[in-house]
Image (spheres, grey):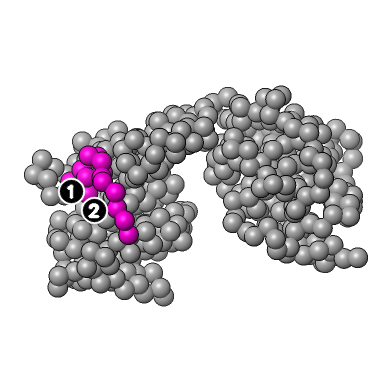
Amino acid sequence: MELKTFSRKQLETMTWWLNPMYKDKEALICDGAVRSGKTFCMSLSFVLWLSACFDGACFAICGKTIRSARRNIVTPMTAGLREMGFSVTEKLSENCLVLSYRGRTNRVYIFGGKDEGSASLIQGMTLAGALFDEVALMPRSFVEQALARCSVEGSRFWFNCNPEYPSHWFYREWIKKADKRRALYLHFTMRDNPSLSQRTIARYERMYSGAFYDRFVLGKWVAVSGAVYPFMKDSSFVKVPCGPFEDYVVSVDYGTVNPASFGLWGLKNDVWYRIGESYFDSRREGFQKTDEEHYQTLLDLIGDRRIRTVVIDPSAASFIELIRRRGELSVTPADNDVLNGIRKTVGALKSGRVKICENCVDSIREFSLYRWDERGEDRPIKENDHAMDDIRYFVSSILDSGECVTVFAAKRKG
């Protein structure tokens, strides 16, 4: 693994536990911009600390999920540790790393803190320290249960995250009270990562706008407000491209009392275009459609195209079952993480990987009306959001899934 020169802040992250100035500190908090290099340096620092200070102890690396902890922390770190002379043995069945260095051996367990029930997974353990990757995405109950497990003399806590809204519990209880918590607080920007070129930094600066720009580029804890997609103006919408498309997908936000929105997507030259849609509002029309009638609407939208899959809100159980029973189309339950899906959709729209065509009038109408709820946590108002939801399902489940576009999950019969 090739490591470039570290920045001053990265070096401070890696060596703070050796610095006499911080001998009274019991925790490290690193927050700030995306791609600022804080995660890797903190991970390496955590392992160096535990290997230098303990032998035969247990530790925890916590991510939102075990999978994300492996992706963000374990995999990038393992190769580097082996090059440095560590023996690293991964016990997959136990979600555990056994780390040995210069005669000392310690165990690091991997946990996911995705919801309130996750706290029970870590109960009963005795730990000498814990690292929390993207701590702002974890429930407070899980974090506090993990902290309570760190009862070994000399134990320390390690936190990193990108900013969220300013009333978030971690911002209020840890960042704003860092001195009281005996925590060293280091704030990162992209320019604290010397491996990023100016061109790369400029690309990230173009990807975000509004509160997401403030959070992910400037690293500020700010509240979202106003339009969810303020950059979507009249000039943002394009004509349907001519010629054949390489792949097709349909995304569905299903509703009976609420509107049902179906979007038809076509891939051309590495860009996904929303080339058609169907939008049915039962309140506006004065009657409700059955599952069978919605299914016929879906077939009419598809026409004679070969559709890779239909991505649909996982809560629409009866409609999903109907599609599966018919056997004509593949169906994929959508990733329904709202905030993360909006973040991905912002990036896809601003980068041009996804474009909305001018004939999609209900999508265009909702882009102008879809707004943030400013009364607390990050969430959009549950109005004018049906096309917005089906677009988000598409981006999160198809565009961001890494699936190969040359493989169709199923074909229409006949």
- Name the residue: 24% across, 53% down: 45
Question: How far across and down, in percent of the image, does residue 99 sit?
Answer: 25, 69
Compared to residue 8, the image places residue 322 above or below, namely: below
Rendered residue at 91%/65% (across/down):
414
Which amino acid, mark 1?
Thr
**Residue interval drawn in magenta:** 1-16
Q: Is residue 151 visible?
A: no
Depth check, front residue: 172 or 56:
56
Say if residue 278 shows up in the picture: yes
Relative height, residue 304 to residue 362 (above, below):
below
Q: Is residue 130 above or below residue 365?
A: below
Classify 255 as above or below 147: above
User: What residue is shown at x 75% (from left), y 41% (from top)?
Assistant: 274
Q: Which residue is mark 1?
A: 15
Based on the picture, tell me whether residue 2 belongs to the magenta stretch.
Answer: yes
Q: Nearer the viewer, residue 178 or 310?
A: 310
Residue 198 in the image, given as x and y percentages of width and height: 40, 35
* Position of residue 278 in the picture relative to residue 344 (left or right): right
Query: Helix, strand or loop at disc 2?
Result: helix
Q: Position of residue 275 (x, y in %)?
A: 79, 41
Image quadrant for the N terminus?
A: bottom left
Numbered mark located on residue 380 in the image: none
In three-dimensional space, the C-alpha distance between marks 1 and 2, rounded to whole angstroms, equals 7 Å
- Looking at numbered disc 2 in the image, what kind of residue is underneath it? Ser
Position of residue 362 in the picture relative to residue 17 (left or right)? right
Q: Quadrant of residue 383?
A: top right
Residue 67 magenta-highlighted: no
Query: Relative to residue 205, is residue 37 drawn left or right?
Result: left
User: Do labels 1 and 2 touch, CB within 8 Å?
Assistant: yes
Image disc number at residue 45: 2
Label 1 residue SS:
helix
> Where in the figure is residue 277, as x and y percent of width and height?
81, 41
